[in-house]
Amino acid sequence: MFPFLKPPQIVDPDTASALQSTFDWALESFDSDYFANTAGLIHPSREYFPDRADNELDMARALCKRICEYAGLSQWPFTVQAPQYFEAQMPPLLGLTSQTPPQNTQEVASVQHTLEISYASAMMKKPMDLVGSMSKNIAQHYLYQSQRIPPAGPESFDAAAEIIAIAMGFGIFIANSAYTFRGSCARCYDPRANRTAALSEDEAIYTLALFCHYKKIPNKEVTPSLKNYLRGRFKKARKQLEYTNLK
């Protein structure tokens, strides 16, 4: 390579290495067979989310059910609570660790407790953030139930959960909701409608590129669902991966 030709990159080499290590750790530590054989890239469209409801709680429950199906966790005892009734607390450890449905369905049927998640009512106006937030919350439960420590330590729990959500197929939602431009109208801005992100936009885009690399998904099947200004950055992330000679 000529010295004046710099390889494309959207994250520095150390960050790229850390993201790859956590992504690979997620594949090795959790259900790699599900990732290889079943997981797919989920898009923000009626094809993937055809559900309708008369009220926000029923809509949130329908979305949660749909997300769990795509994540391979439809057998897990998730329940959605309305925001006014939800109390954040440490969930019980239920001994559930797999995305593959157990042969003996009594394993799940015998579970007495549930895993509670909620939502912000304001997010109903921003379904991209809502699905991104719910998929992250579900990934957080998945990570917590495993009792595994991410490569970067316990303090990286939230970032690792987002990487797991991307590995489950929700990378478009995580990337598109990683940053929200406030705009010039303060009265139109509602911070409650925005997802709280652990990964930066570029980190989320790079991890999405990793997912698509491993799943052999071409750019043309990804970029139409990304925010306009993220499409070029995604292509740049794919090129950065090519320069790393990733297999």
Image (cartoon, rainbow, N blue to C red):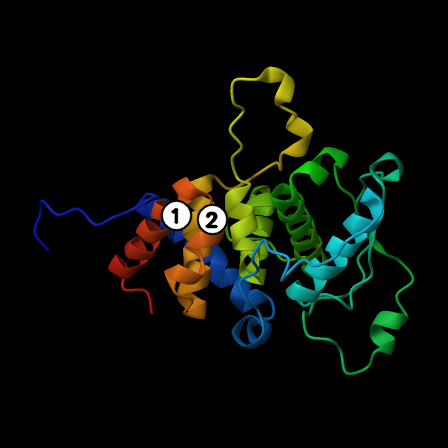
Quadrant where the N terminus lies? bottom left
Horizontal and vertical percent position of residue 238: 33, 56
The three-letter amino acid code for the residue at tag 2 is Leu
Residue 198 pos. (x, y %): 55, 40
Q: Is residue 2 above or below residue 30?
A: above
Residue 69 visible in the shown view: yes
Q: Is residue 10 left or right of residue 198?
A: left
Alpha-carbon span between mark 1 and mark 2: 6 Å
Please tell me whether mark 2 sits on a helix, a strand or a loop.
Answer: loop
In this picture, residue 172 sits left or right of residue 190? left
The residue that mark 1 highlights is 231
Residue picked out by circle 2: 226
Q: Position of residue 41 (x, y in %)?
A: 53, 62
Work out whether residue 65 or residue 143 is closer to the camera in this orientation and state it. Answer: 65
Quadrant of the rendering where the C terminus is positioned: bottom left
| Number of other residues with Cα within 10 Å of mark 1, as a class: few under 14, some 14 to 19, many 20 or more | some
Circle 2: is it few (<14), some (14-19), or many (20+) Cα within 10 Å?
some
Question: Closer to the camera, 21 or 74?
Answer: 74
Q: Secondary structure at mark 1?
A: helix
Query: Which residue is rendered at x = 45% and y = 69% of the image?
Result: 215
User: On the rendered structure, is 32 left or right of 116?
Assistant: left
> Measured from the top left, where is residue 180 in percent x and y?
53, 32
Above or below 103: residue 6: above
Left or right of 199? Residue 114 is: right
The amino acid type of the residue labelled 1 equals Arg
Q: Mark 1 near mark 2, Cβ–Cβ under 8 Å?
A: yes
Residue 19 visible in this rendered orientation of the protein: no
